[in-house]
Image (tube, rainbow, N blue to C red):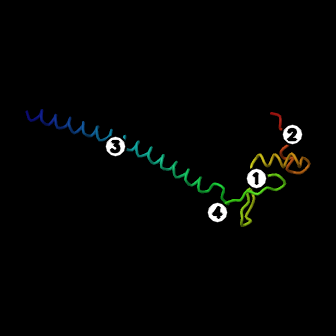
Amino acid sequence: MDEKDRLRDKLEKKERAEEDRYFKKRDEELLARLRASQRAAGEDEVRELARDRCPRCGARLLTVKHHGVAVEECPAGHGAWVDHGALETIAQRERDSWLGRYFYRPKPVV
């Protein structure tokens, strides 16, 4: 009878150990998903805070029109930023300049 009790105890311990491993693995997976979602939310928040700001001083960029092209400028004079559409507009006007040659250079044949 004593041997049966020891065997039952061993089986119960094994069962508990397997159960503990299962729940530990599940908890780790849940924590990993939670951390990933929190990281993504934090990155989105930082991206939103940095949107339309000067990378040097953090000031809010001002939209200014120069010759019909919208340019984002730092109010402290740290730089100006132009999007792709504005660059194409400038390049069309300045076909003979370096910018126009950059945009309208012959494409390499592959």
Q: Amino acid at mark 3?
A: Lys
CA–CA distance in space, label 3 to label 4: 44 Å
Q: Dot 2, crowdedness within 10 Å: few (<14), some or many (≥20)?
A: few
Residue 98: x, y in percent?
87, 51
Q: Dot 1, crowdedness within 10 Å: few (<14), some or many (≥20)?
A: few
CA–CA distance in space, label 1 to label 3: 51 Å
Depth order, front residue of 14/72: 72
Q: Which residue is mark 1?
A: 82
Q: Amino acid at mark 4?
A: Gly
Q: Dot 4, crowdedness within 10 Å: few (<14), some or many (≥20)?
A: some
Disc 4 + disc 2, Cβ < 8 Å = no
Residue 73 drawn above or below residue 84: below
- SS label for mark 1: loop
Disc 2 + disc 3, Cβ < 8 Å = no
Disc 2 + disc 1, Cβ < 8 Å = no
Q: Amino acid at mark 1?
A: Val
Depth order, front residue of 86/97: 86
In the image, what residue occupies the spot 59% across and 53% down?
48
Disc on the earlier residue, 2 or 3 = 3
CA–CA distance in space, label 4 to label 1: 17 Å
User: Where does the C terminus fall, quadrant-wise?
Assistant: top right
Residue 85: x, y in percent?
77, 46
In the image, what residue occupies the spot 74% across and 59% down?
73
CA–CA distance in space, label 2 to label 3: 60 Å
Q: Which residue is mark 4?
A: 58
Residue 106 is tagged as 2
Residue 24 is tagged as 3
